[in-house]
Each structure stands twice: as structure tokens, then as C-alpha cells.
Amino acid sequence: MKRLSIGAMLALVALAACQTALTQSESSAVPQQEATREAAPAPAGSSAEPSASPAVGTAQGAAYVTAAKAQPPAVAIPKHSYTSCDVNGPYIAMTFDDGPSAELTPKLLDILKERGIKATFFVVGQNAAEYPDILRRMASEGHEVANHSWSHPALTKLGADGVRRQMENTSEAIARATGRRPVLMRPPYGATNASLNKRLAEEYGLKVVLWSVDPLDWKYRNSNRVQNYIIENAHPGAIILSHDIHATTVAAMPGTLDALLAKGYKFVTVSELIAMEVPVQLAKKEPVSSPSPAPR
Ligand code: NI
């Protein structure tokens, strides 16, 4: 029992260290010197594996509960979901949900191509199956294609079989069109919870991607409002949410993207952003009194 507890406590320390704070500093402008600094993003496919998280078996799990009580500050949750990423540099990820749209998505792809910008598309499976050519174009132009369910239900209201159908059918439609299975998913309405996140990672190899900047473009069909909100709220490591099924959103993009480029931001896919996350130092367990993460 004692050996188990020590093992569990070690696992706990490792888990706590693996966890990255989800909150971002509110710095709005990108320092110009950072904009010129080069960092080599990892290739998109290289972050496909779910991040290492020691499996806790039932016996260890019981010991772990004891250990957690003995060590109050640690909250050990493996990281299966992201709202933003801690990165060194002005990197951001634009994400577009609910498409593809036969009319609007190709227009958006033109806008991105003109600027050499890579984005991430969380596609709805039934649209993906209808427009495989658009998915093929996304992939061939360097964008990431990810899973946004088959028919856009709240996954938290479905049983295990329902979730399975929503995930598998969509991943298959994406793989058929692009030749690659997605490694990321975004739950419709952002509706998820810790156990669903864990299941999506372990059973389907899908990390859950939420967002840190939301212009509510589905609600406010006003290009200027969408553009201003994104420009004002973008931050290094941001995951920016929008929808390529709204004409007002696509119309907002040239101005939005040009302004972000002018501020020094660099666009990467979500998998690239995740791969850039600053490694946590296992030895340094208490980052408590550092008021703001020092930009390097
Ligand atoms: Ni959606």
C-alpha cells in the first residue's frame, strides 16, 4: 500500500507538471522584435499522438485519491483539451467551423492563399461528405482539416454509440477526401466535459480544441464588428473561433487578417500551435509567484 501511494504521488506530480495553465496573459500587442524572430514550427502531422499522460489504473486510482488529499495544491487532470496555447512568439491559429460551404469556403481559401495563411477547418461530417473536393483543396493548400461531428449535436447529450457515430463517420469522411485522419475535434457549442474529453482522446485519438477568442460571428452578422473584435482580442497563442458558413465572416477576413499580419502575428494550424507549447519543467513544481510569464 505504501509503495502504491508513493507511485501514485509520483504520477500526481508528473500529471500536475504536465498540465499547462489555460489562462493567457492579456497582452494585446505583439512586441515587434518577437515578430521578426524565427522559430521552426513542427510539421503538422508530428503532434498527432495524444500527449503523454500516465495511465492510472483502478488500484492506483484509489491510492491516488488518498495522495490527492495528502497533497492539497495538486489538481491532476491530463491535458486532453485546449482553449489556447503557451507559446514563445506571436503565433495564433484561425479556426473556421461548420463548413464547408460550397460558395463561401472557396472564397475564404482564396483569401488565405493570397496571404500565405494556414488555418484550421472544423468541418461538419455531412458537409464534408458532400464537398470532398473542397476538403481536398484545404489539405493540399496546407490547412488542417478537423472533426466537428457529423450533424452538429451537443455530444454531452448523446450516449456512447451516438458519440462514436458522430466521431467515426466524420473522421472517415475527412480521411476519404484528404487521405489523412483528423487528430483534433471541436465539440459543437463547445459542449463537453472532462470525461468526454478523455474518451475522445483515448478512444478516437482526438484532442478537443475550444477557443480563446470568440467574435460571436454567428450572432452578429456584421463584418466590422467581427473584424474589430478579433483584432482587439487576439493574443499570442490564441485560438480564434469563427465560421466559414456566414458571408459576413468571410467578408471580414481580408481586413482582419491584414491587420493581424501588420501587428506581427504569424498564423499556424492548431496542431502546429499545440506542438509549439512551451515544455513544462518537471523539476520546477511551484511557478506561483511569477506574476506574468516572461516573454523570451
Ligand atoms: Ni459549430
Image: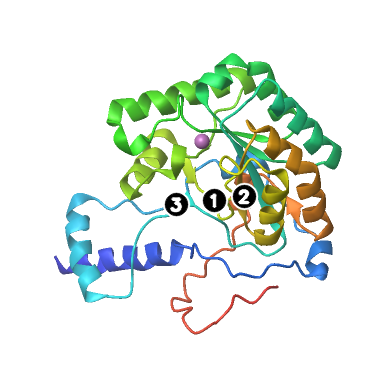
Pointer 3 with pointer 1, Cβ within 8 A: no
Q: List the residue tagged with mark 3.
A: 52
| Structural distance between the alpha carbons of marks 3 and 2 | 26 Å
Residues 128 and 174: in front is: 128
Secondary element at tag 2: strand
Q: List the residue tagged with mark 1.
A: 211
281 w.r.t. 121: above or below: below
Mark 3 or mark 2, which is nearer to you? 2
Residue 85 seen? yes
| Residue 94 x %, y % | 66, 46
Residue at figure coordinates x 71%, y 22% from the top left: 103
Farthest left residue? 1
Q: List the residue tagged with mark 2.
A: 240
| Structural distance between the alpha carbons of marks 3 and 1 | 22 Å
Secondary element at tag 3: loop
Pointer 2 with pointer 1, Cβ within 8 A: yes
Pointer 3 with pointer 2, Cβ within 8 A: no
- The quadrant the C terminus occupies is bottom right
Residue at figure coordinates x 22%, y 75% from the top left: 70
